[in-house]
Amino acid sequence: MGTFFSEQGWLCLTVTAVLGATILCRFKKSQGQVGRKVVCLAGLWGGACLLSLSLFWGSILFSLSCFLLYTYFSGQELLPVDQKAVLITGSDSGIGHALSKYLDELGFTVFAGVLDGNGSGAEELRRTCSKRLSVLQLDVTNPQQIKDAHSKVKEEVQNRGLWALVSNAGVLGLPTDGELIPMTDYKRCMAVNFFGAVEVTKAFLPLLRKSKGRLVSISSMGDIAGTSDMWDKLEKNILDHLTPDVQKDYGQDYIHKERSFLKLIKTSGEADISPVLLDIQHAISAKSPFALYAPGKMSYLWLCFASCSPTGIFDYVSKKCHSYGRHMPRALSTPNLKNETM
Ligand SMILES: NC(=O)c1ccc[n+]([C@@H]2O[C@H](COP(=O)([O-])OP(=O)(O)OC[C@H]3O[C@@H](n4cnc5c(N)ncnc54)[C@H](OP(=O)(O)O)[C@@H]3O)[C@@H](O)[C@H]2O)c1
């Protein structure tokens, strides 16, 4: 008790309180989603330090933790918008469309790249957004359109450069057995989701370098879910391309049931995409952005599981989650056909 009321004791407590308050102020300015949890943990940690160690060593340890947290929160602070220019590909619909509107509201100069410049998505952006937003015709698989879009952006941003490129355009395929997917779908997927993103990035990197800005690439663990019209189209496309032999081996029922996986994603998925928008805003604006974001509940855990678990265990779990774990191609589930194929 004597130590607690000593001069040294009061000094330690004052330093601890001042550091704690500084961290709280810094936290208020930062918008990192993990911030609140980190501050709670820091509070608990500070309490534990002071209770379990002597006041002096407890304060030293807590001060060190505060210094680290202060550095962390300084990096999470958002830079001023200051009409920074951002190009987003695939703004016709979905995340790209919502992001274009969101960044426009925040005051960014938005270049919304669209697949169809006369489509309803493009029209809506023109109608509802500010004059700062420009809709650009930009099919990421079309080198001439990439070149034209680059010239327009360059002319507009002049010496400021482009602050961020959000590579968002992507296409959906029916997640089914590799044997059933037509080669045209494999090629289209690579053309848009991979080569398109690479070509757009290469074209705009010099403008990004000028501003020392950001490149944000959006990818998926398989879940652009699409709409039921889109599923019809994908299913028809698969059936049209199958040879009679393969169609007989799998059976139409099997292919039809594959749609249930997309339906499951759509119904179980989170409809509110604001965590995605906030993470992209953070990637664009934070002083020290993270290298990887996984918005949405539990998505980080799934990512860790997919990266770290042994292949056999991952295969077993994903088979259980996916519809193909519950039904089999006709040739494998019908005894006679099984023997014929053997
Ligand atoms: N939704 C999710 O749960 C989720 C999760 C993780 C990651 N992602 C990723 O987020 C991105 C956007 O997904 P989303 O859910 O918003 O899907 P989406 O609504 O289908 O958006 C994709 C956009 O890309 C456009 N596009 C297609 N081909 C293009 C091309 N050649 N050039 C330019 N634009 C093209 C599409 O235009 P049309 O509308 O005309 O087809 C559409 O506007 C994708 O890269 C996806 O992999 C999505």
Image (tube, helix red, strand yellow):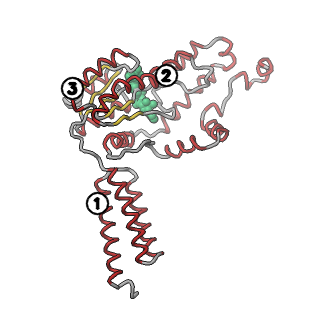
Q: Please give left or right for residue 337 compared with residue 324 in the image.
A: right
| Label 2 crowd bin: few (<14), some (14–19), many (20+), radius 10 Å | some
Q: Is residue 123 above or below residue 22?
A: above
Distance between the alpha carbons at the discs numbered 3 and 1: 38 Å
Q: Position of residue 157 (x, y in %)?
A: 22, 28
Mark 2 vs 3: CB contact within 8 A: no
Taking the view exactly as shown, the residue that stands out farthest to the bottom is 2
| Label 3 crowd bin: few (<14), some (14–19), many (20+), radius 10 Å | some
Q: Quadrant of ligand 1?
A: top left
Q: Position of residue 87 (x, y in %)?
A: 31, 29
Taking the view exactly as shown, the residue that stands out farthest to the left is 131
Answer with the quarter of the image where residue 341 lies.
top right
The disc, 3 or 1, on the residue closer to the chain's N-terminal end is 1
Amino acid beneath label 3: Glu
Identify the residue shown where x is 59% and y is 23%: 256
The disc label shown at residue 329, or none:
none
Residue wearing tag 2: 190
Residue wearing tag 3: 156
The disc label shown at residue 25, or none:
1
